Amino acid sequence: MPSPDPHADQPILAAGASLDDAQSAVILLHGRGASAQNILMLAAEFERDDLVYLAPQAAGSSWYPYSFLAPLSQNEPKLSSAMRTVGRVLDEVAAKGIPPSRVVLAGFSQGACLASEYAARNPRRYGGVVALSGGLIGNEQLRAVDPPADKVFDYDGDLDGTPIFLGCSDEDPHIPLMRVERSAEALLALGGEVTMQIYPGMGHTVNDDEIEHVRRLLARLQPSD
């Protein structure tokens, strides 16, 4: 029988400042087939060594087994386990005196979907949310139809002005453009301060402009706040 919490015993890697010394944190979530070590390489690009970067590892290098567009039930129990993993990391930094308002949830690809979905399901003021080549997770065939966001997603609560950056290609082979657009609408409706940037022909990767957007978002986490 599959474990109900398959990600629970996986390691959490760290970079940057120590958790004991940092006043702000970034939780980095890797993509499918990648690793915590891979996503931590982005920390050097952000040029903020006063922050602690924490990267949990997914069991089997995948947060959930199927596409983020698949019916939610098909991605269980790994999806719920992934959500609990993010919550555990938030609890760990909170125990060190870092509140969610000083924590940025960031990810690439599958990790981007997880970061944005966690924030939408658990809305409050975060230091920020960064989804690089990803969008909200849901049970809807957006490749064929174009419904409004309120017909795709069902969330309640208030992100209370959380700065959110969504970056993606217009022809990403894994992330339909309409899903990114509807995700932006849904996060805006939840009270997020949303910036969406679409890059023509980029493919499934991260570019320098996205890194610069993240640097600007992290600059809002001033040590004296």
Image: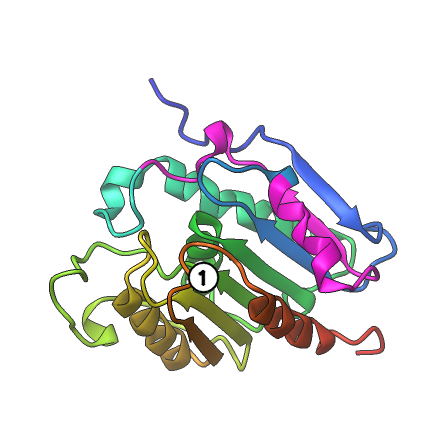
Residue 43 among magenta residues: yes
Q: Residue at x 46, y 42 (%)?
A: 82
Residue visible at 38% across and 71% down in the picture: 200
Above or below, comparing residue 110 to residue 33 in the picture: below
> According to the image, label 1 marks what residue?
116
Residue 192 included in the magenta stretch of the image? no
Q: Quadrant of the N terminus?
A: top left
What residue type is disc 1 on?
Ser
Residue 126 visible in the current orientation: no
- Can you give x and y, in whole percent of width and height, for residue 115 in the image? 49, 57
Total marks shown come to 1
Q: Nearer the viewer, residue 112 or 138?
A: 112
Q: Is residue 38 left or right of residue 157?
A: right
Quarter location, residue 26? bottom right
Considering depth in this image, is 220 or 88 the residue closer to the camera? Answer: 220
Quadrant position of the C terminus in the picture: bottom right
- What color scheme is it? rainbow
Can residue 207 be seen by looking at this rendering?
Answer: yes
What range is drawn magenta here? 38-65
> Badge 1: how crowded within 10 Å, few (<14), some, or many (20+)?
many
Question: In the displayed structure, would residue 151 be above or below residue 77?
Answer: below
Outermost residue, right direction? Answer: 21
What is the x, y in percent for residue 219?
Answer: 73, 76
171 left or right of 21 in image: left
Q: Nearer the viewer, residue 88 or 195?
A: 195
In the image, residue 194 sits, relative to residue 215, either above or below, namely below
Q: Secondary structure at mark 1?
A: helix
Of residues 57 and 7, the one nearer the viewer is 57
Q: Residue furthest front?
A: 201
> Residue 184 in the image: x percent, y percent?
38, 74
Q: Residue at x 17, y 60 (%)?
A: 143
Q: Residue furthest top?
A: 1
